[in-house]
Amino acid sequence: CRMPMKLTLVTPVLPVADVVRTQEYYRDVLDFTVEWRDREVFGGVSHGTVSLFFQRTDNPPRGITCVLNTPDADEVFRRYTEKGANIVDPIATRAWGMREFTVEDRNGHFLRIGHVDESVADYSQFHRNM
């Protein structure tokens, strides 16, 4: 009997011009932990169960969006605002049931951070097998 295939984790690899400066930004402004670096061409940060990798690239593309879930988007929004993060879309409850906001990092990539607003939407079936 074969076990059904199950994927359990995704770690985006974001192209960046400078891995060290990117890790410093994520540490100093977005409260991530710098986990590791391979010379200055590849590195990772984490926050809780979230991991992001950065790869040095000549002329890196911009505009990649990562969606991050949190128990309290309002608290994260408050902390990031206090630390001077570049909030490009303020916190609001969206029609699809997420209370979220968007931060643009120093490389032009976006972090959409939010939590489910259960008064608007029920995502319990979506997350039940994760």
Image (cartoon, rainbow, N blue to C red):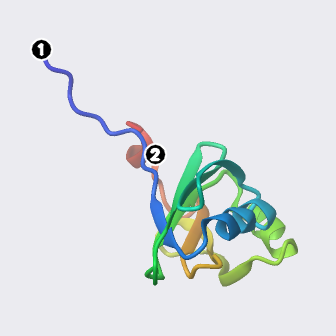
Name the foreground residue: 92 vs 57.
57
Asked whether residue 65 is in view, the answer is: yes
Disc 2 from disc 1: Cα separation = 29 Å
Q: Is residue 116 left or right of residue 86?
A: left
Asked whether residue 116 is in view, the answer is: no
Asked which secondary structure carries label 1, the reply is loop
Mark 2: amino acid: Ser
Q: Is residue 83 left or right of residue 128?
A: right
What mark, if any, has residue 110 been given in the picture?
Answer: none
Mark 1: amino acid: Cys
Question: Tag count in the figure?
Answer: 2
Residue corresponding to mark 1: 1
Residue in the picture at 39% in, 45% down: 125
x, y (%) of residue 67? 51, 63
x, y (%) of residue 124? 46, 45
Residue in the picture at 81% in, 75% down: 81
Is residue 102 positioned above or below 79 on the image? below
* Label 2 neighbour load within 10 Å: few <14, some 14-19, many 20+: few
